[in-house]
Amino acid sequence: MAEEQALRVTLGQHSRAGQHGINQDFHGAVLARGHLLGSKGIAVALADGIGSSAVSQVASAAAVRGFLDDYYCTSEAWSVRRSAQRVLAATNSWLHAQNQRGHARFDKDRGYVCTFSALILKGRELHLLHVGDSRIYRVHDQALEQLTEDHRVHLPGAQTCLGRALGVNPGVEIDYQCQPAEHGAVYLLATDGACAGLDAAAVHASLSRSAGDFDAAAQALADHAQAHGSDDDITIQLLRVDALPAGDPQQLHRQREALALPPQLAPRMQFEGYTIARTLHASARSHVHLAVDDESGRQVVIKTPSVDMSENADYLDRFLLEEWVARRLNSAHVLRPAGTERARRHLYVAMEYVQGQSLAQWMTDHPRPDLDSVRRIVSQLAAGLSAFHGKEMLHQDLRPENVMIDTAGTVKIIDLASAHVAGLAEGGAFGMSAAPAIAGSLQYTAPEYFIADGVASERSDLFSLAVLTYQMLCGQLPYGLQVTQVRTAADLRRLRYVPVRHWRPELPDWLDAVLHKALQADPARRQEAVSEFAQDLHAPGPQFHRDRPPPLARKHPLLFWQLCTLALAVAVLGLLGRMVLGA
């Protein structure tokens, strides 16, 4: 099979000091290879210190070095935006702390302050991060398209000052945008000192004269800026997209293609260093077996694709995702991988064995559980889902069959193959996209998955958790099967919640208020996080306690007894009347 095309670029850079003699700009790039190229991409960054400060060159160097070092250490599951903004937030906090150290009043014109701009090319997408007045351009044939906004404030007398920069405040707002990358596109990053006389003609002339040497072209543009009056520090980075990957930047499908489909497994069979003990579950999609690791003697679960799915490439690609996700989560309430690192010849997943029962079985055994028992399960499920959400993942298939309760009472979320991973969705891995896809059982799926413009989020998993909570309490679904019939926004408005107290009137009033909020058709009206929902179940706030009028017997006891006496008298008279007529 022909090797797939990888991401390739041509990069040129040049930086020089202005007339003051100290170059307060800093720049750098990481042209990643192998695994990091797919998971994190190529990063180019520059920063510009402010001329009035004697230490801003330290800020520029710290910003660029810290970004390029730390970005590649963030979780592969995170999106570029989250990874980059987390790193820049940490850098900003460090710079601001340096400014506050030993100063009763911080003067930003003399502190550790700098602008920052970065371009990250991952898969087939371009990500831009920016704060300050450095610039990122797209170079067209006849014009330069400025992709960033100058964060400058206009003052009286035609003067301007930086409105936003790293190090000024404890927090910083970073501009972010994402756009499709294009083969052959040329991008230019420049500090403000490089922008004098800069236009498309100058860029193309420099590229033409350099005959493909992008470092020489960047140097020629610096000469051009100085010739047009720039006396400031000058930094220029030129990047051309030479090749884009055809598909999955994670290349896990290549791993799948290198593995043979497993044979049909049976008890006492030897397979990949395991001895098969017995079959735990078999369906049209997969077979699950209990096995013993021959090296450690530990019990594990071996999951293999069924023969029916052997020709479904998308399913087989996603099959590997389950273990990929499990290896990147660290929670007692999410199924863990088996932990063996031995080489594989066949396509399978090895996970920890949970000795216990499914939540589906627990619900059968406890048709009318007490509220505390349900709360204990929900709190653990919320902790497991929070682990997903902390890595920018959605589970997307929370249902009774995908929850295990071990013999110690620990609740674990299993079956991770339907997870949505933001870091993979950026590159289109496994057919993922930012748009929601129905991956789980319909009756537990949030309504936003069913409408064309719906957006899946952490609150979608929250909806599924609330459905489970409702079902544990009363054995029913809060909307019946109405949610599965939703197709439009109008359908959402027609959803009617059935109070849980309709089935179990002995439960407290506030419980329905908490559940109803988590089960709102509009995600924005639900709790913000699964942890908030779990907290509301334990300690409902005043907003969940309805102000009901006191009963008449307590509010007006005399009137109550007068009405009771009157009702009794009417009843007695009616009875006497019937007796007289009967006589």
Image (cartoon, rainbow, N blue to C red):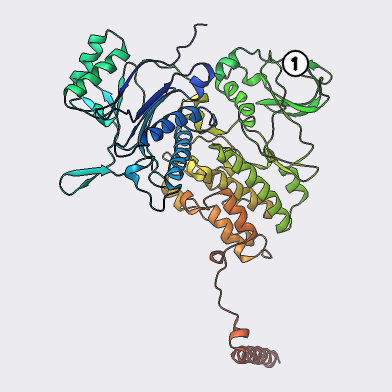
- Residue 370, image x and y in percent? 73, 58
Q: Quadrant of the C terminus?
A: bottom right
Give left or right: position of 223 versus 182.
Answer: left
* Towards the viewer: 402 or 487: 402
* Towards the viewer: 466 or 264: 466
Residue 93, compared with residue 147, is above or below; it is: below
Residue 300 lies in quadrant:
top right
State the SS at label 1. Answer: loop
Q: Can residue 124 be seen by looking at this rendering?
A: no
Give left or right: position of 57 versus 315.
Answer: left
* Towards the viewer: 212 or 230: 230
Residue 225, compared with residue 85, is above or below; it is: above
Q: Residue at x 78, y 17 (%)?
A: 273
Q: Can residue 416 be seen by looking at this rendering?
A: yes
- Residue 538, image x and y in percent? 65, 59
Residue 358, compared with residue 570, is above or below; it is: above
- Residue 84, image x and y in percent? 45, 34
- Count of numbered badges drawn on the protein: 1
- Residue 377, image x and y in percent? 70, 49
Tell me the residue that label 1 is attached to.
Answer: 272
Indicate the amino acid at tag 1: Glu
Q: Residue at x 75, y 46 (%)?
A: 362
* Towards the viewer: 85 or 385: 85
Give left or right: position of 534 versus 191.
Answer: right
Q: Crowding at label 1, few (<14), some or many (≥20) Cα neighbours within 10 Å?
A: some
